[in-house]
Image (cartoon, rainbow, N blue to C red):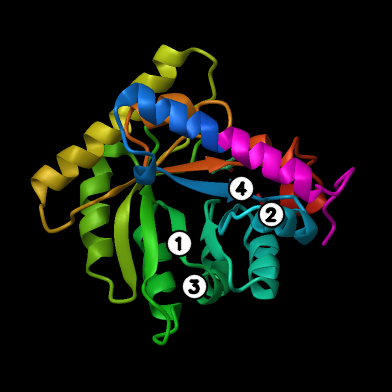
Amino acid sequence: MSVASPTILDSTTAAARLDAVRQTIAAACLKSGRSPEGVSLLAVSKTFPIEAVDAVAAAGQRAFGENYAQEGVQKAIVRLPLEWHFIGPLQSNKTRGIAEHFAWVHSIDRLKIAERLSAQRPVNLPPLQVCVQVNIDGEATKSGCAPSEALALCQAIAALPQLQLRGLMAIPEPTSDTSTQRRNFAALRILRDTINDADASLNLDTLSMGMSDDLESAIIEGATIVRVGSAIFGPRTYTNTSATEL
Ligand SMILES: *Cc1c(COP(=O)(O)O)cnc(C)c1O
């Protein structure tokens, strides 16, 4: 794998960072009157080598997130006991490896991808857990369906046999302004509630939102999965693999 990593994460550092992130999660839960059990931590290992995943896994983390299909499948295949979540843009010619080796896909923004994942999901595995990615703040360059399309897409996905629709995911434009962070995350929560009200059979229980720099705002606004990369693994160095796959 042509991923540059200046230093391999050691298990002591991994454990300390994981602990710090868990404390941030606990503090945000306390502040917002939520139970910490209601928030799961996804460790985003994109661009980091398998040794770094192992260090974080040794500290007790089981769920890992990947953005690039090829890199993610390579890692999942060698560490099948871990729980792998795909969180990046997905092209239709890259769905098979994800359908075969991942537990979750957070980044579904069109029906065609969902149909392929369902068709390619091996029947001996539990259904693939999926979220619809929504472009919640209207960023033109961003992936994700428009909020107005989310209900119809959710209903179509819910009908697919090998997928289990769990909720919504968003990646709002990064900002240090906490009121903007909270407004975007609140918009995703409200959309989730609106969809559940419109079609109670969907029963969406998941809000995948919040990353290293905005996870506190996300938790206050109802995140059930936070996706944390650099706060656990350290700063990323992007190389050719990642850039071309994007
Ligand atoms: C990279 C990435 C993350 C993690 O970002 P950090 O800022 O490193 O925590 C979370 N979600 C998605 C979709 C990402 O691409």
Looking at the rendered structure, the secondary structure element under dot 4 is strand
Image vertical order of residue 173 relative to residue 244, above or below:
above
- Residue 152: image tag: none
Q: From the viewer's perspective, is the residue at label 1 or at label 3 nearer?
A: 1
In the rendered structure, which disc, 1 or 3, sits on the residue that comes first in sequence?
Answer: 3
Residue that label 3 marks: 99
Q: What distance separates the C-alpha of mark 1 from that of mark 3?
A: 9 Å
Task: Specify whether residue 150 is in view.
Answer: yes
Residue that label 1 marks: 104
- Residue 245: image tag: 2
Rendering coords of residue 114 (x, y %) = 38, 65
Three-letter amino acid code at disc 3?
Answer: Ala
Rendering coords of residue 70 (x, y %) = 68, 64
In the rendered structure, which disc, 4 or 3, sits on the residue that comes first in sequence?
Answer: 4
- Residue 44: image tag: 4
Image vertical order of residue 119 relative to residue 58, above or below:
below
Rendering coords of residue 97 (x, y %) = 58, 73
The quadrant of the image that shows the N terminus is bottom right
Q: What distance separates the C-alpha of mark 1 from that of mark 4?
A: 13 Å
Residue at position x 37%, y 53% from top?
Answer: 131
Q: Is mark 2 within 8 Å of ligand 1?
A: no
Q: What distance separates the C-alpha of mark 4 from that of mark 3?
A: 19 Å
Three-letter amino acid code at disc 1?
Answer: Trp
Q: Is 174 in front, or is 219? A: 219
